[in-house]
Image (cartoon, rainbow, N blue to C red):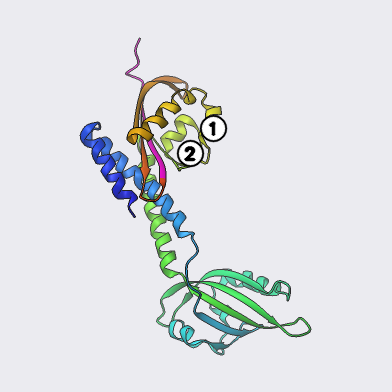
Amino acid sequence: MSASWDLVNLLTLLNWNTLPGWLWLLLWGSSLAVVMYWQKRWLQRDQVGFPDVIMLARADTTVVECNEACQKILGDWRGRRWIDVLPAEEQEQVRQKIAQLTPQQPTFTRVGRVSDASGQTRWFEWINQGIFDWQGRLQFIRGVGRDITEKKQLEENLRLREAQLRTLLDALPLAVWARDPQGVLILQNATDRAWFGDLLGTSLEEVAQQHPHWPEYTPQVLADLERQGFSQLEGKEVIQGQERYTYRLAVKLQDQSKGLGLLGIVLGRVDLMLG
């Protein structure tokens, strides 16, 4: 992924030319939250390839046939009821889905865990299709499964990293935020929420209704970002009912194909107020 390296180049330039070292390190850590947001988005794309684990079972889920790939990965399940190997909390849900199968709506999908032939836990995404007789009675269920274990492990690793980074960002005494290429807020740390309210998911236009003074400098910020990739502003703002001098820094995040949006911080100081 090239976005991280492009960001390193930008932040390195800022470090040498404009920013102190601690601020450069802060921006580097904060940028990981934005990158992880897009990693999660990319995980949602459709995977290429058709599932290769196939089972044919009776209506009570007793397996009568399973293909070679199924036997290799999961073992020979013929004669076993596949519903019995599901976690107890999932079995009733599956029974309800089977009971709802009709010739008009013959399929249902599910994602679940299962032990493979070596006893290791794997995740599968299943497409289950009911096969009916001429009277509309369910006779067989054909299940086609795709192994998504690696995807699930990656998602879990991302969740852990995101939780760790969220804890770090929320502990900072300064506001950290990020917006996607459409201007929608996708990241707020605890300080940003406390100072400006919960704005997650709002656009620049929507947030202007809650903070009328922001549109005054937004065009300048966007112009600076387009021209040089970052923007710095100092001024006075009312935060939590108290007037403070603030320093705002925003940087433009992008990779070789498309923009990833904006990352910014806000420092507010009461003791720097004049008069």
Residue to which mark 1 is pinned: 205
According to the picture, the residue beneath numbered tag 2 turns out to be: 183
Q: Residues within 10 Å of mark 1 (few under 14, many from 20)?
A: few
User: Which three-letter amino acid code belongs to the residue tagged 2?
Assistant: Gly
Query: Which residue extends farthest right?
Result: 135
Tag 1's secondary structure? helix
List the single residue furthest toward the top: 275
What amino acid does circle 1 point to? Glu
**Range covered by the magenta-colored residues:** 260-275
Asked whether, in this view, residue 18 is left or right of residue 162, the answer is left
Q: Is residue 206 left or right of residue 39?
A: right
Where is residue 118 shown, x and y percent of the image? Answer: 40, 81
Which residue is depicted at the point 49% across and 22% down?
Answer: 213
> In front: 122, or 131?
131
Task: Work out how far the residue at label 2 is from the one at label 1, CA to CA, in angstroms.
Answer: 9 Å
Image x and y of residue 42, in percent: 45, 57
Q: Tell me, yes or no, whether the two marked residues, 2 and 1, touch with CB atoms within 8 Å.
A: yes
Quadrant of residue 128 in the image? bottom right
Residue 149 position in % (x across, y down): 43, 69
Tell me the residue at 55%/33% (across/down): 206
Q: Give the answer, above or below, for where 202 lies relative to 73.
A: above
Residue 270 lies in magenta, yes or no? yes
Q: Examine the image and state in which quarter residue 9 appears.
A: top left
Q: Residue at x 50, y 34 (%)?
A: 204
Dot 2 alpha-carbon crowd within 10 angstroms: few under 14, some 14 to 19, many 20 or more: some
SS at badge 2? loop
Image quarter hosting the C terminus:
top left
